[in-house]
Amino acid sequence: MAVQLLILRGVPDGEADEIRALLSEHHIDYYETPAGSWGMSMPALWLNDKTQLERARGLLAEYQRQRQSVARREYEELKAQGRQRTLIAMFREQPLRYLFYLALICVIIYFSISPFLKFGQ
């Protein structure tokens, strides 16, 4: 019986390709369900053989540790070089966008709590 290994929603294409290659390299039989034309279905990787689940999860865990290590190293290198983007730098790039988002958040908060503020009157 098939068993779900990994939900692919939000997974970058490059990472999904690396995971597919990892499973193929270790001769783990899998198939993929796509998101569908409108993205309504659940994209996922499924194993055909439930007995391979623990082995596949172990491979994925090791892959994620390696990927995290590489990402952390890249982040530290960018930070040391002073090229890591900060919130202030992103605000300086598009100040109107962030001010719009801040105003939108304030409006949503106001409409969310205003019935409770007027409740006692």
Image (spheres, rainbow, N blue to C red):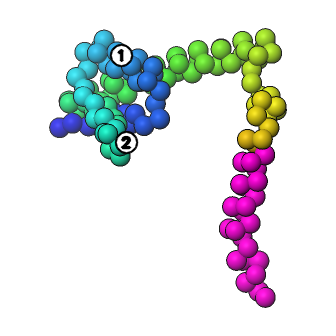
Can you see residue 1? Answer: yes
Residue at position x 77%, y 86% from top?
120
The amino acid beneath tag 2 is Gly
Main SS of the magenta part reads helix
Q: Determine the residue positioned at 30% across, 11% down.
A: 25
The quadrant holding residue 32 is: top left
Pick whichever of labels 2 and 1 is earlier in the sequence: 1
**Residue 28 left/right relative to 19:** left
Q: State the mark number for residue 22.
A: 1
Q: On residue 121, which mark appears? A: none
Provide the secondary structure element on which disc 1 rests.
helix
The residue identified by callout 2 is 39
Q: Which residues are magenta?
A: 99-121
In the rendered image, the quadrant that contains the N terminus is: top left
Q: Is residue 88 above or below residue 27?
A: below
Residue in view at x 76 percent, y 16 percent: 83
Does the stretch in magenta take in 85? no
Q: Residue 79's x, y, as percent? A: 76, 17
Q: Quadrant of residue 2?
A: top left
Residue at 78% x, 46% y is: 99
Q: Are marks 2 and 1 in contact (CB under 8 Å)?
A: no
Separation of residues labelled 2 and 1 (CA atoms): 25 Å
Q: Which amino acid, mark 1?
A: Leu
